[in-house]
Image (cartoon, helix red, strand yellow):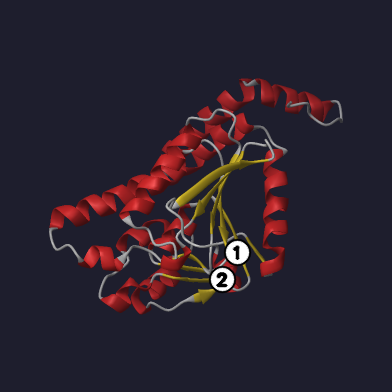
Amino acid sequence: MSDTTDPVLLHARDGRGVHTLTLNTPKAFNVLSEAMLAAMQTAIDAVAADSTARVVVIAANGRAFCAGHNLKEMRAHSDMAYFQKLFADCSRMMLALQNLPVPVIARVQGLATAAGCQLVAQCDLAVAASTATFGVNGIDAGLFCATPSVPLVRNIAPKQAMEMLLTGEFINAEQAMARGLVNRVAGPDALDAELEKLLLAILARPREAMALGKACFYRQREVGIAAAYQLAGQTMACNMVHEVAQEGVQAFIEKRKPNWS
């Protein structure tokens, strides 16, 4: 697909509540330009306002998933205030993905580097084509990928993350899966089929339980273990009194499938 005036395409599939946000500047390798960041934020906010949303898929048109920030756009500026706003806007968008009450899946069909790799790491789950590659190679241009390091080190082991950050070297899809950056790898022609398997597994479970669980998952990771247990216990108590858990437990007892429709 050629570039259009819409940097991000947002659409829902099959009436299932699956929202796909497609990065749509393939000629520019889907870089996170100012326009792209603004469009992503608008799309994410739209999903957040949709109570019927069940899953978000982050996809991309073209050969690259996302090649990071727009260095040409950045080079046109030299003032600290501009860069502080740029990275604040990017961080806001990344956190908005985490704060969505539904799972977010990266569909990585090609190159994901620097802030593009950050975007993959920030998603809850990721499915990658076997031809995809991943890197945080800002260091090659004298710019340490500090903001990409935030979700990266929360996905993979610290020394592996540091090696990628210091050397700028890329890893392939199989390495990314072995290190915990992606969940599943499939051939390019089988990527959508693998994504669909994951979607079906998620859609078969209740949205309410996933919303509670996702919020707890990220909050407990950032606090001490005692606070984490307190938060997790309260989350499970709230979940247990909800009708979806009541139905699920009753179905288990009665040896039948739960009716969550």
Q: Quadrant of residue 151?
A: bottom left
Image coordinates for residue 94, horizontal then vertical, percent:
40, 49
Instruction: Examine the rendered structure and indicate whether residue 130 appears above or below residue 60.
Output: below
Q: Quadrant of residue 55?
A: top right
Which residue appears farthest toward the right when viewing the image?
A: 255
Frontmost residue, 177 versus 39: 39
**Relative side of 23 to 146, left or right:** right
Residue type, numbered disc 2: Ala
**Relative side of 238 to 146, left or right:** right
Instruction: Examine the rendered structure and indicate whether residue 130 appears above or below residue 201.
Output: below
Frontmost residue, 32 versus 186: 32
Q: Secondary structure at mark 2?
A: loop
Frontmost residue, 229 versus 11: 11
Instruction: Examine the rendered structure and indicate whether residue 11 appears above or below residue 114.
Output: above
Residue drawn at point x = 73 percent, y = 57 percent: 193
Badge 1 density bin: few <14, some 14–19, many ≥20, Cα 10 Å: many
Residue 219 visible in the snapshot: no
Quadrant where the C terminus sits is: top right
Residue drawn at point x = 58 percent, y = 71 percent: 173
Q: Are marks 1 and 2 in contact (CB under 8 Å)?
A: yes
Distance between the alpha carbons at the discs numbered 1 and 2: 6 Å
User: Which residue corresponds to mark 2?
Assistant: 132
User: Which residue corresponds to mark 1?
Assistant: 128
